[in-house]
Image (spheres, rainbow, N blue to C red):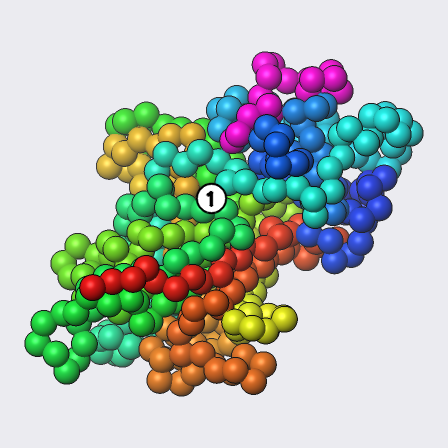
Amino acid sequence: MNPADPTIAPGLRSWVESANAADSHFPIQNLPYGVFKPSADAAPRVGVAIGDQILDLARLEQTGLLRTPRPLFAAASLNAFMAAGRDTWRSVRGQVSTLLAADTATLRDDAAARAQALVPQAGATLLLPVEIPGYTDFYSSKEHATNVGALFRDPKNALLPNWLEIPIGYNGRASSVVVSGTPVRRPNGQIKLPNQERPVFSPCLKLDFELETGFFVGVPNGMAEPVSSDEAESHIFGMVLLNDWSARDIQAWEYVPLGPFNAKGFATTISPWVVTMDALAPFRTLQPRQEPEPLAYLRHDGQHAFDIQLEVSLRPQGRDHASPIARTNFKHMYWTMAQQLAHHTVSGCNTRVGDLMGSGTISGPDAGSYGSLLELTVNGKNPVDIGGATRAFIEDGDEVILTGWCQGDGYRVGFGSCAGTILPALPHQ
């Protein structure tokens, strides 16, 4: 964290009044980036969330109020901006912070310019913020890995021998990453029922959410150019909420010997606003102690965890409101984002601008902090109560909503929400 960074000062306020509310996810200290359409027939462009508004960066760039090395924001993704590099990221953040500050008159006192530059979030369409060339999902919560290992293996040996030595991960499907609000169809697949000799083809009967975060690579590395743990965070552009939907029964049958395939490839939902590492800097905290000490390439000094409060809510079909079913914190993660990226590249694997890395399910130390229904219900044996309804796993029509924020002194740096509603499976034979 750079304590001299004026964009993260706790006392900073904006002339956009909704941004100054104590419970707003998008105060002036946040300034997350996203892609939106102000109307149905408008072209996509890049914006910044501020309170309940969106600051149209393409418009500011066109009018000269925002200086960039080349046009970056009249675009359908953040990729060109991310590829411009860290100096440009910080220059733009500084300029936007100044324009939105309460004591800057440029837009505050120019009603016509303000009307063109600000778009109400409620009337805009939020799009997938990044063109994602690759997606990797990790398995980095010790509590989650222990819970799952205890369910399906010897509880005394819940963690496999390699888990405490390397950030376990697998390559997922970038093609099926969707933005919050996109409906998700229940997958069909092979399921092996305990009382049948052969598998059946069926809709998933154990559909689950996975409470995760994700980060985007902004500075790529070349082949045979590994990124060190100490340097890794300088390659990260920002973070999103991530729900890596999981078909538990399909996965149970297919995962031996090479891991999940159809059970995880049908959909991954992310939040539309990318919160930058600069905005998250004040919320650094010490990561859990790692025993045994990692090998040298996975070691890093300082604080590499982040105090991000996370919550899962579920709205059963036909209900008007959602009820919270789990609360946890990103700071519980055993393996850090820096270690994940260092391990991903240590073999010589290259990354590209826009690559997405999922944290893996984030669970805390007690039952109310588990990041999946698999854990919350003990694989469906103990259904959870949701405002009078019960769920062992997700049913058709249910909406799952993830949210998260960092609590500052009188303000929050939030991620908004990451939501998806389940549609019935396609007809099958």
Q: Residues within 10 Å of mark 1 (few under 14, many from 20)?
A: many
Give x and y (percent) for residue 277: 57, 40
Look at the picture and state if 385 lies above or below 121: below
Quarter holding the C terminus is bottom left
* Magenta segment main secondary structure: loop
Look at the picture and state if 373 lies above or below 219: below
Q: Is residue 276 visible?
A: no
User: Is 50 one of the magenta-colored residues?
Assistant: no
Q: Indicate the secondary structure of the residue bearing disc 1.
A: strand
Left or right? Give the position of 402 relative to 195: right
Left or right? Give the position of 423 relative to 59: left
Question: Residue at left 59%, top 14%?
Answer: 70
**Could you say which quadrant of the image residue 255 lies in?**
bottom left
Left or right? Give the position of 15 relative to 86: right
Question: Residue at left 72%, top 23%?
Answer: 60
Give x and y (percent) for residue 298: 35, 46
Q: Is residue 168 visible?
A: yes
Question: Residue at left 74%, top 47%?
Answer: 52
Q: Residue at the right extreme?
A: 109
Give x and y (percent) for residue 393: 40, 74
Q: Which residue is mark 1?
A: 215
Name the one closer to the observer, 328 or 17: 17
**Could you say which quadrant of the image residue 103 lies in?**
top right
Name the one closer to the observer, 311 or 294: 311
Q: Magenta stretch? A: 61-77
Q: Amino acid at mark 1?
A: Phe
User: Is 74 one of the magenta-colored residues?
Assistant: yes
